Image (tube, rainbow, N blue to C red):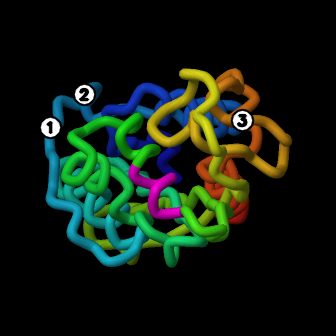
Amino acid sequence: MNKTLVLATGNKHKLREFQEMLEPIGYKVLTMKDIGISVDPEENGTTYGENAYIKCKAVAELCSYPVISDDSGIELLGLGRFPGIYSSRFVIEECEGSYENAFVVINERLKGGKDRGAEYHCSICYLENKDAEPVIFDGVCAGYMLDIPNGHGGFGYDPMFHCYENDKDFGVCSEDEKNAVSHRKKALEKFLEYLKTRG
């Protein structure tokens, strides 16, 4: 089995998280840049898994390595799990690209005693080759939205999110503290179990 994988992302934080989980079991994780690929397909799926597959497939069409990709978002329980797969688009289109603005909008919409529960969701897609059936692995990190953002760490919605599992605000967590309980880590753990069954 090929133990070199291509990660369909340009995000350095994601790359580190994947490498930390996969390299200890003998896998090498390459980026698109490492193999000279640049592709940015339209993510028009209706689920995280579909969007992850769109990215995976686009890269797999251009290389001979197995490919992994992920898609993620935050779901606010009091807003019917909005923004979900539109987490990035919501910030760009409705909040002028500002997560600070997004928090103001979210706080306004959560008025009236609405549930402040929140869940980060992640789906990882694995394609052995461009013609293979996609395999999807899901992870969830549960918590709630803070009344006031705390810290400037992490990415995106993190300063607004308190995690139940480690009882910490993601905006003041170290990267290692966050990665230990993240939605991506949980999806990655399932992916690792899958890889182990394949030798």
Amino acid at the residue labelled 1? Ser
Image height check: is 40 above or below 124?
Answer: above
Mark 2, residue position:
33
Q: Secondary structure at mark 3?
A: strand
Q: Is 98 left or right of 190, judged from the image as shown?
A: left
Image height check: is 27 above or below 191?
Answer: above
Q: Secondary structure at mark 1?
A: loop
Residue for point 59% across, 68% down: 112
Residue for point 55% across, 63% down: 111
Residue for point 75% across, 38% down: 180
**Earlier-in-chain disc, 2 versus 1:** 2
Is there CB contact under 8 Å for labels 2 and 1?
Answer: yes
Q: Is residue 106 magenta?
A: yes
Provide the residue span drawn in magenta: 105-110
Q: Quick one: which residue is furthest to the front in this view?
A: 112
Magenta segment, principal secondary structure? Answer: helix
Which corner quadrant holds the C terminus? bottom right
Tell me the number on the disc at residue 38.
1
**Earlier-in-chain disc, 1 versus 3:** 1
Mark-to-mark CA distance, 2 and 1:
7 Å
